[in-house]
Image: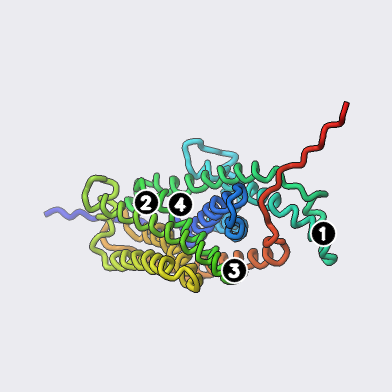
């Protein structure tokens, strides 16, 4: 008789709840910016109101996301090592360059869009006039905003690419190593961004027409998420894709994952039906449900994916642990975003943001 015994070492989880916060916030920010750009850069009527909310979501979540990333790295020095000892074949190393570039560009684009508002506020608001004049940098012109917007959009696409790829390349985790994962990250990020925009609309605007417009966009994003999920499941069940079949086999048969699948279907179907059947007066429900769905997708992927053992049977416990670095960190990150949103709406004339004006050309002097 032979006895084969597998012994594993005790180790901490590689991805902590801070990582869930980072991947959620940065995806919401990048997709919100891509949603805002057409409204600011095109001449189509009716898009500027949604673009203002999208830019607010992009800026506030874009500033909060890197803070969650640094917390997940436990010390800023680890982030600095990506620059000193870079690795061109690592998606994580590329992210060390993409994320700061994106945050700088989205802030620069937001400043350019709001520059006329800063200039006008410096003339009418005596309490903060010096601050607004300083932010306006001497003038109201913002004709250069489209170039900053296009650069920020390219950086946002880079963020979506690297965040999906750096998880997908982990071959030791079948649930992560699937070609559809980057697309699912981007699509659920758009769902979270539109959900956040709906919540902001309910708090700040309460415009039924804008609410209906955002709900229709949310329905489209949810339909894309549902299509990607159906394709993932079909690829796994059919066996046409070995990667998806292995990923499905790693979680099949576990009741908790069956409940997660039912939850995912409900989180997509409920806001989808409400957004189509009642696009008005449902923004709170569809918005909060969409935010919940986008966040829980990342929790299931990161924390649930680590609950599947590499060697052995069964599942590890993937509950949210309490403590300053875990549950309190999740709550604190959302609190940080709330503070940024209050500061943004209190001190920035966001409702005056308009499409960038073309630069005024001086007439040539007659000879």
Pointer 2: what residue? 176
Q: Where is residue 23 in the image (x, y as percent from the top left)?
A: 49, 55
Q: What element carries label 4?
A: helix
Label 2 neighbour load within 10 Å: few <14, some 14-19, many 20+: many
Q: Are marks 4 and 3 in contact (CB under 8 Å)?
A: no
Pointer 4: what residue? 186
On-image quarter of the C terminus:
top right
Q: Residue 122 carries which label?
A: 1
Q: Distance between the residues labelled 3 and 2?
A: 29 Å
Label 4 neighbour load within 10 Å: few <14, some 14-19, many 20+: many
Q: Residue 335 carries which label?
A: 3
Label 1 neighbour load within 10 Å: few <14, some 14-19, many 20+: many
Q: Are marks 3 and 2 in contact (CB under 8 Å)?
A: no
In the image, 307 versus 124, the foreground residue is 124
Q: Is residue 341 visible?
A: yes
Figure check: 106 above or below 215: above
Q: Distance between the residues labelled 4 and 3?
A: 24 Å
Label 3 neighbour load within 10 Å: few <14, some 14-19, many 20+: few
Q: Quadrant of residue 13?
A: bottom left
Pick whichever of labels 4 and 3 is earlier in the sequence. 4
Q: Position of residue 164 (x, y in %)?
A: 44, 48
Figure check: 242 above or below 11: above
Q: Do the residues labelled 2 and 4 touch (CB within 8 Å)?
A: no
Q: Mark 1, mark 2: which one is toward the viewer?
A: 1
Q: How far apart are marks 1 and 4 (CA)?
A: 39 Å
Pick whichever of labels 3 and 1 is earlier in the sequence. 1
- At horizontal 46% and vertical 68% (from top left) the residue drawn is 279
Pick whichever of labels 3 and 2 is earlier in the sequence. 2
């Amino acid at each position: 008789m032979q006895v084969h015994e597998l012994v594993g070492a005790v180790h901490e989880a590689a991805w902590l709840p801070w990582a869930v916060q980072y991947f959620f916030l940065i995806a919401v920010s990048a997709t919100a910016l891509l949603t805002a750009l057409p409204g600011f850069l095109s001449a189509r009527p009716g898009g500027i109101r949604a673009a203002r909310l999208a830019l607010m979501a992009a800026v506030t979540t874009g500033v909060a996301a890197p803070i969650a990333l640094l917390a997940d790295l436990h010390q800023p020095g680890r982030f600095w090592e990506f620059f000193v000892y870079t690795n061109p074949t690592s998606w994580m190393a590329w992210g060390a360059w993409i994320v700061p570039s994106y945050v700088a560009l989205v802030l620069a684009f937001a400043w350019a869009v709001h520059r006329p508002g800063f200039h006008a506020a410096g003339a009418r608001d005596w309490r903060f006039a010096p601050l607004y004049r300083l932010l306006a940098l001497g003038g109201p012109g913002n004709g250069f905003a489209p170039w900053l917007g296009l650069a920020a959009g390219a950086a946002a696409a880079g963020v979506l690419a690297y965040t999906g790829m750096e998880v997908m390349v982990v071959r030791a985790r079948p649930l992560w190593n699937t070609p559809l994962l980057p697309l699912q990250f981007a699509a659920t990020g758009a769902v979270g961004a539109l959900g956040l925009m709906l919540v902001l609309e309910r708090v700040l605007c309460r415009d039924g027409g804008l609410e209906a417009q955002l709900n229709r966009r949310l329905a489209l994003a949810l339909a894309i998420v549902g299509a990607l999920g159906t394709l993932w499941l079909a690829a796994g069940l059919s066996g046409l894709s070995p990667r998806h079949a292995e990923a499905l086999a790693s979680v099949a048969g576990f009741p908790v994952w069956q409940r997660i699948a039912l939850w995912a279907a409900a989180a997509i179907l409920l806001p989808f039906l409400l957004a189509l059947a009642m696009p008005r007066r449902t923004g709170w429900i569809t918005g909060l449900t969409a935010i919940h769905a986008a966040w829980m997708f990342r929790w299931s992927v990161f924390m649930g994916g680590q609950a599947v053992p590499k060697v052995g049977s069964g599942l590890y416990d993937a509950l949210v642990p309490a403590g300053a670095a875990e549950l309190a960190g999740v709550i604190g990150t959302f609190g940080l975003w709330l503070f940024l949103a209050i500061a943004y709406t209190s001190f920035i004339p966001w409702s005056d943001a308009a499409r960038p004006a073309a630069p005024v050309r001086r007439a040539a002097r007659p000879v």
